[in-house]
Image (cartoon, rainbow, N blue to C red):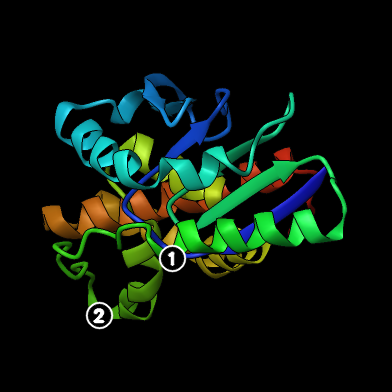
């Protein structure tokens, strides 16, 4: 199989024409341009489904034209879109890659209404990681981890792991609910990143 991967953050998460267990895309959203589209079970909510459905009504044909043979599939995650196809020859494969890029360029941007994380002074250097990974919704966090690259997950684990004890101490002593939530979610994300890397057969110290 050829694997085409395009990095771009988006507010959508879906897969087709078959389910994708890693992302949790096992809830059938519907059929668009003749292709079944699945979304994460935990994210199967009316407003989210309407958001995804509106976009797919306009652009699902771009994915439909790229997957035709048995076993070919695609997945759109929080920060990465991947297409798995059987080689047809250089001209056709280049055309499919160009079509994939066209689809990715039209993906809606991530939600921009997220407030900056509230962190105590000693953890403010983790602010950028917290924005990306300290997600309180288990489904969204799992989706983000599953869609992260090896390098991103390694960076998350290596940065947060040495400070897990310090974070645990603060969680036990702080009365600031906001600090507890953000740091707890970030620590959880780091642990999940390590498990995801292990699942992929990657080593990380």
Q: Specify whether residue 157 is in view.
A: no
Name the image quarter holding residue 124.
bottom left
* Left or right side of 24 for 200: right
Residue at x 75%, y 41% (from the top left corner): 85
Instruction: Kindly report the distance in space between the C-alpha atoms of the residues bearing marks 1 and 2.
Output: 38 Å
Q: Where is residue 180 shown, x and y percent of the image? A: 22, 53
Mark 1 near mark 2, Cβ–Cβ under 8 Å?
Answer: no
Q: Looking at the picture, tell me which residue is in the foreground, 146 or 138.
A: 146
Picture coordinates of residue 88 (x, y %)?
84, 46
Tell me the crowding category of disc 2: few under 14, some 14 to 19, or many 20 or more residues within 10 angstroms, Cα based.
few
Residue at x 57%, y 56% (from the top left corner): 100
Residue nearer the viewer, 144 or 98:
98
On the image, the x and y values in percent for residue 202 come to 78, 51
Residue depicted at 39% across the width and 44% down the height: 141
Label 1, on which residue? 105
In which quarter of the view is residue 146 placed?
A: top right
- Tell me if mark 1 has few (under 14), some (14-19) or many (20+) residues whose alpha carbon lies within 10 angstroms of its own: few
In the drawing, does residue 122 fall left or right of residue 180?
A: right
The N terminus sits in image quarter: top right
Q: Looking at the rendering, which quadrant does residue 67 occupy? A: top right
Pair 1/2: label in front: 1
Identify residue for label 2: 121
| Quarter of the figure with the C terminus | bottom right
The count of marks equals 2
Element carrying mark 1: helix
Task: Evaluate whether residue 104 shows in this view.
Answer: yes
Q: Which mark is residue 39?
A: none
- Residue at the image position 13 percent from the left and 62 percent from the top: 113
Q: Which is more toward the observer, 125 or 162? A: 125
Q: Secondary structure at mark 2?
A: helix
Mark positioned earlier in the residue sequence (1 or 2):
1
x, y percent for residue 49 = 24, 31
């Amino acid at each position: 199989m050829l694997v085409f991967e395009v990095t771009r953050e988006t507010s959508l998460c879906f897969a087709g024409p078959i389910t994708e267990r890693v992302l949790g895309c096992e809830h059938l959203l519907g059929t668009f341009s003749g292709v079944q589209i699945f979304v994460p079970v935990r994210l199967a909510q009316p407003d989210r489904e309407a958001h995804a459905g509106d976009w797919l009504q306009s652009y699902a044909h771009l994915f439909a034209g790229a997957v035709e043979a048995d076993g070919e599939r695609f997945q759109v995650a929080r920060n990465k879109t991947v297409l798995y196809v059987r080689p047809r020859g250089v001209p056709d494969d280049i055309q499919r890659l160009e079509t994939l890029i066209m689809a990715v360029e039209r993906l809606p941007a991530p939600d921009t209404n997220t407030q900056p994380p509230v962190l105590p002074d000693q953890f403010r250097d983790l602010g950028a990681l917290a924005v990306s990974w300290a997600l309180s919704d288990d489904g969204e966090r799992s989706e983000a981890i599953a869609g992260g690259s090896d390098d991103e997950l390694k960076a998350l684990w290596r940065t947060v792991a040495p400070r897990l004890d310090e974070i645990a101490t603060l969680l036990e002593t702080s009365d600031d609910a906001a600090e507890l939530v953000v740091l707890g979610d970030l620590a959880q994300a780091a642990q999940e990143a390590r498990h995801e890397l292990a699942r992929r057969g990657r080593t990380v110290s």
